[in-house]
Image (tube, rainbow, N blue to C red):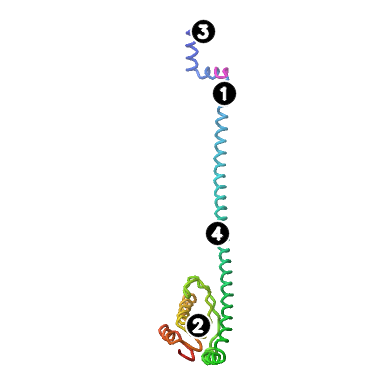
């Protein structure tokens, strides 16, 4: 091919668009360009599909995370419920033990004091029976003292309550009243007021009371009904 012909062809390719496309058609470049365009379009469509799938995957991930969170919360609720059931079981056992101890104490009291103690005890509660029970309703207050206000450790508190209108009277019966009994009733009153928002009167009843216990009762505002001071 002569030099002049080559120059002329190059010039035509550069300057003559119709000639240039004719040559491209002959060389199959037109088909190649069309294929490239189609490929670019397919890649763009695929990119859009991947983007949509990415959004769907994001939503699915959020749903899975919410499900996992709900599962964890449900697990905590079940664990809390199991712990409550366990504690309630412990409370029932403690209450059963307290009832058994009370029964034993009453039995022992009868053997220990005999008829004399029985007479003295009847005299000491005469005020309670003849006066208070005529105008007060008798209730039994049982409460699980989780903070150990009364005994210094978690325990079940069980005490008689006389109620009339807004007046509440906590009553304890003891075979022989000592300082510990008075102090315990006082702490029961503190717990009762904290739980029920009512400040109760405090009354302790028994055949005999020790002198130091009587002095403490006066200091703490605990009313005492006893037949004898020892």
Front in this rendered view, residue 97 or 188:
97
Which residue is rendered at x = 56% and y = 52% of the image?
68
State how many labels appear. 4
Q: Nearer the viewer, mark 1 or mark 4?
A: 4
Answer whether residue 164 is magenta in the image: no
In this rendered view, identify the residue nearer to me: 11 or 101: 101
Q: Residue furthest front?
A: 112
Task: Identify the magenta region.
Answer: 23-27
The secondary element bearing badge 1 is classed as: helix
- Which residue corresponds to the image point at 57% horizontal and 18% vertical from the top-left? 27
Viewer-side residue, 105 vs 18: 105
Quadrant of the rendered image containing residue 29: top right
The alpha-carbon separation of the residues under discs 2 and 1 comes to 102 Å
Q: Earlier in the sequence, mark 1 or mark 3?
A: 3
Q: Which residue is mark 3?
A: 1
The residue wearing badge 2 is 170
Q: Secondary structure at mark 3?
A: loop
Within 10 Å of the Cα at label 4, are there few (<14), some (14-19), or many (20+) other Cα atoms?
Answer: few
Which residue does the numbered mark 4 point to in the structure image? 76
Which numbered mark, 2 or 1, is in the foreground of this view?
2
The span from disc 4 to disc 2 (Cα, nearest Å) is: 39 Å
Q: Which residue is the site of mark 1? A: 32
Tell whether label 2 touches label 3 (CB within 8 Å).
Answer: no
Q: Earlier in the sequence, mark 1 or mark 4?
A: 1
């Amino acid at each position: 091919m002569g030099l002049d012909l080559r120059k002329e062809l190059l010039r035509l390719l550069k300057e003559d668009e119709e000639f240039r496309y004719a040559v491209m058609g002959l060389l199959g470049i037109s088909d190649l360009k069309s294929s490239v365009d189609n490929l670019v379009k397919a890649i763009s469509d695929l990119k859009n599909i991947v983007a949509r799938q990415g959004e769907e995957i994001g939503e699915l991930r959020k749903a899975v995370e919410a499900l996992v969170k709900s599962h964890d919360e449900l697990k905590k609720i079940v664990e809390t419920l199991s712990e409550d059931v366990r504690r309630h079981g412990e409370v029932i056992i403690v209450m059963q033990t307290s009832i058994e101890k009370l029964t034993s104490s009453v039995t022992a009291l009868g053997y220990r004091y005999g008829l004399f103690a029985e007479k003295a005890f009847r005299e000491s509660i005469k005020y309670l029976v003849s006066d208070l029970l005529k105008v007060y309703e008798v209730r039994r207050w049982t409460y699980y003292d989780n903070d150990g206000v009364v005994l210094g450790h978690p325990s079940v508190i069980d005490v008689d309550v006389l109620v009339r209108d807004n007046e509440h009277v906590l009553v304890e019966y003891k075979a022989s009243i000592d300082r510990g009994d008075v102090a315990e009733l006082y702490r029961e009153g503190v717990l009762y007021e904290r739980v029920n928002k009512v400040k109760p009167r405090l009354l302790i009843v028994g055949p005999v009371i020790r002198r130091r216990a009587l002095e403490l009762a006066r200091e703490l505002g605990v009313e005492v009904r006893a037949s004898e001071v020892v």
